Image (cartoon, rainbow, N blue to C red):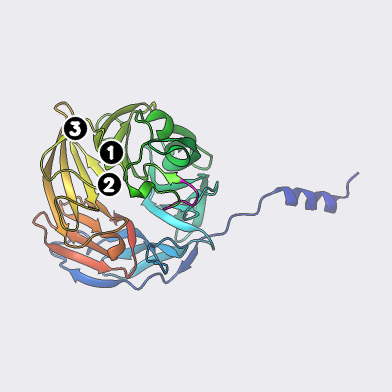
Amino acid sequence: MIPGSVLALALAACVPSPPPEPALGAGPDVVLVTSDPARSEVASAGVLTVAFRLDEDGDGRDEEGWALEIRGDGTVAWAVAPPEDLRYGRAHRARDGATLIMEGVPEGATDEGRILRWTPDRGTVAVTKAPTSHHDVAELDDGRLAWLAHRFTDAVLDPIGEAPVVGDQVVIGAEGGQGSVLVDTLDDYPVPPWWICDHNTLGRRIPGYHELLHSNSLVRDPQGGGWLVMARYLDAILRFDDDGRFDWQLGGRDGDFAFDPGARFVHSHFTDAWGDRLLVFDNGEEHAFVDGSRVVELVVDREARTVQQAWSVERREHTRFLGDARRLPGGNTLVAWGNLGEIQEVTPAGEVVWAVDVGMPVGRVEWVP
């Protein structure tokens, strides 16, 4: 018979230690730049975002950063930092008011990755295993989570030939579990891998691999379900149905839609879709239309397969990475200007009625009522 104390020690050794908790702290030094409470929807509310400390190369890819909520008066309601050697890539406001935080390794072929359901008063209340997860997470009506993940493999990359490549996946699963792959762009996107731009260079972003599409946005399609995936390097939004089948491509070399002059976007992000509208943060690298970056509202006619520009706000500076935009309930637009470190609220006329300087690059941004 095994002594009780020995058995207890053996069982304890089989139980994994709990993962390290996010660390509450002061966060970055946020400065309120502009506030017009009479016209602002944020001044009496707040915003949720992530912020990254720039490394020596200025590309924001180190492990230091924060998920944080900023009040309308510019003060930090809470800020939480990841455990050592990890990074928070996305903070998404859940339906119950908690925050879904994507936690992983900044770059590289690794199986690490988690999605935390976190609150300031209770800490982490749920953990979902999300290996190789990156950039975006969404919450479905039935409580399941969907997120973007990487796939590391070898494939034929035109015109290079056989090469180590990184594709993207859409993964869906119950919270607290480990999801299953719904979409694999290497299998389900019908265009074979090809050299799109210099961002495909071996090791440019992920050591030892050619990153193919750099999908960065996962949005539920407001028209009939399915998923809209922004493939940044492709300059396109890809639609997949709820069975994972590819439907159409908006933008890029192999696009299915005709764009009005000035409506096309370049190396972009997007978070917001409603009706026949898409709100795109257009980074505008080598842009033909704007000497800088912009937010553009697009009207998409799916039957006629046309895209028109309905509205835009521009900035005469390039955001080299990140960036986000969301339409607020009252009609204003919330904009995170990526590596420029500013979050602004602008009116339909393009006037800035609320703004903060976070002092470091900011990622996705959401309104907190």
Amino acid tagged 1: Ile
Q: Quadrant of residue 182?
A: top left
Asked if residue 183 shows in the view, the reply is no
Q: Secondary structure at mark 3?
A: loop
Tag count: 3
List the residue tagged with mark 1.
Answer: 237
List the residue tagged with mark 3.
Answer: 257
Q: Secondary structure at mark 1?
A: strand
Q: Quadrant of residue 194?
A: top left
Q: Name the residue furthest right.
A: 1
Number of other residues with Cα within 10 Å of mark 1, as a class: few under 14, some 14 to 19, many 20 or more:
many
* Picture coordinates of residue 299, whole percent (x, y): 15, 39
**Are circles 2 and 1 on residues that touch, CB within 8 Å?**
yes
Task: Quote the CA–CA distance across marks 2 and 3.
Answer: 18 Å
Span shown in magenta: 204-209
Relative placement, left or right, of 147 versus 314 is right
Number of other residues with Cα within 10 Å of mark 2, as a class: few under 14, some 14 to 19, many 20 or more:
many
Amino acid tagged 3: Phe
Q: Going from the N terminus, do you reach mark 3 or mark 1 first?
A: 1
* Picture coordinates of residue 53, whole percent (x, y): 40, 67
Q: Going from the N terminus, do you reach mark 2 or mark 1 first?
A: 1
**Are circles 3 and 1 on residues that touch, CB within 8 Å?**
no
- Residue depicted at 14% across the width and 43% down the height: 263
Up-down: is 43 above or below 261? below
Asked if residue 279 shows in the view, the reply is yes
List the residue tagged with mark 2.
Answer: 270
Relative placement, left or right, of 164 versus 93 is right
**Does the magenta-highlighted stretch encompass residue 205?**
yes
Up-down: is 332 above or below 156? below
Q: Foreground residue, 46 or 280? A: 280
**Does the magenta-highlighted stretch encompass residue 195?**
no
